[in-house]
Image: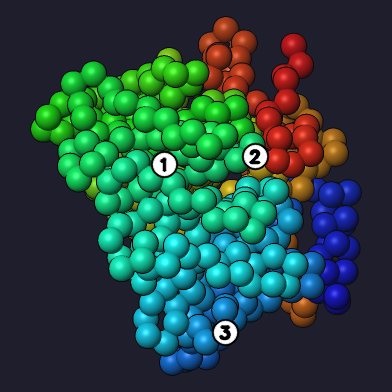
Amino acid sequence: MKKKLLVVALLGACASAHAAWVTTDLGSLGEYGSTRALGIGGHVAGESIPVSGGPMFAFRTGPDGMQLLSGIPGSVYTSGAAVNGAGDVVGQTAKPDLTYSGFVYSHGVMTELTLGGSNAEANHINHIGQVIGSSATPGDAAQQGFLYSRGVMTPLSMGGALTIPSGINASGQVAGYGIVGNDYEQTRAFLYSKGVMTDLGTLPGGTIAASSAINDAGQIAGYASVSATPTYHAFRYDNGVMTDLGTLGGPNSFAVSINGAGLVIGYSDTANGGGYNKYHAFVSDGQQMTDLGTLGGAWSFASGINGAGQIVGSTALANGKEVPFLYENGAMHNVAELVTGFDQVSSYIQLNELGQIAGTGLLDGKPHAFLLTWVPDGGSQGGTPATASMTLTTASKTETAAGNTRQPVTTGKSGKLTALEAMMAKRGLQCPPPYCTAPARKK
């Protein structure tokens, strides 16, 4: 409780004085750990090894600090994969015989999720507690998807040996991909809605498609082959139509996520080359694919986008070092430079609908989880952005560093917002969760 009161006091002081990126230490992860998910309520979930050589635990942070989740009885490790606004956590837990089960932790109760085979995992949960994941069937004959809702496990299958759900929205619609029959060349993206499994087909020239994410409007982002080689293009699926989003000049592109406004993010080959060390992150409004660039290095990947159009991912610096980035208002920022008090920051970060960022870094040589929150200056709306002082809050330590600025909204040459920029409007979400969308921009 002491930690909670200190953070609130410091946030109040920052809000009244200067705009600031506030870094909150969420606690030690022991000998090893990583954040994996950030909910709209500020809950962070992930994994931690508290003692060297000891077991791994899933964890959840909240107003009362960090809570380790030991898993189902007899489990030897547990890892958290996703968390919703209520603080419910899903993930995977291992038993002594090295069989695996999915789990959902809600209201203090850990529930095992499996279809009866030797391995299973849960990877997404919506705000009403519906869970998706995949599980081997009895005898490990196949790997099927599942939807867990109100205590009922519903198998999801495209009819072949493998079906993997990849996203669930607030209405319980599920997107994913699966093999049709036993031919991996006939992998298809699917939409599961109201008990009906729909094959989304593929793009012209190809036979393979996979869904990556779904938004609350039922729009789906993914990628599909466009040739027998195969070559893949990112797509957006909307009202029965799969739209090829193209590339950044190279042969391949892959969609990773989609926000409530239908903006799709991912990574693509460019005209300068392709492959893992040359991909560039992109955002697409369905008409135009925009290269997010890099921070001086050869590559970048986008991993998350919220309703306000803020994007996070990882990128290379000119010296080849990998760092996390935040892209907003037309500019890419090194998140490691926005975090204070940490010696190193992992390139794997998470973003929520409020614009908060969670991640992992070294504090006094040990891995800690952190939460990065922008506190705006009441007098800095429009005009020149205020200088941001950064504050690290812990139960016992406060540090500040000055000199970072938040970029203003950028516009086209005419001074008016382009269609893409209008969709990536300033923050100030108007919702209760989970129905978060970017607010209309005042003209």
Left or right: 155 as drawn, with respect to 384: left
Say which of 380 and 71 sits in front.
71
Say which of 319 and 374 sits in front.
374
Say which of 312 and 336 sits in front.
312
Point 67% across, 54% down: residue: 150
Query: What amino acid is found at the position of numbered circle 2 in the picture?
Result: Ala
> Badge 2: how crowded within 10 Å, few (<14), some, or many (20+)?
many
Please report whichever mark, 1 or 2, sits nearer to the chain's N-terminal start: 2
Query: What amino acid is found at the position of numbered circle 1 in the picture?
Result: Gly
Q: Which residue is mark 3?
A: 73
Q: Quadrant of residue 183?
A: top left
Q: Which residue is mark 2?
A: 170
> Badge 3: how crowded within 10 Å, few (<14), some, or many (20+)?
few
Query: What amino acid is found at the position of numbered circle 3 in the picture?
Result: Pro
Say which of 37 and 72 sits in front.
72
Instruction: Tell me whether circle 3 and circle 1 mark residues in contact (CB < 8 Å).
Output: no
Point 34% across, 41% down: residue: 158
Left or right: 238 as drawn, with respect to 89: left
Please report whichever mark, 2 or 3, sits nearer to the chain's N-terminal start: 3
Point out the image quarter for the C terminus: top right
Residue 105 in the image: x percent, y percent?
64, 67
Point 51% across, 51% down: residue: 154
The span from disc 3 to disc 1 (Cα, nearest Å) is 31 Å
Q: Quadrant of residue 14?
A: bottom right
Q: Which mark is residue 176?
A: 1
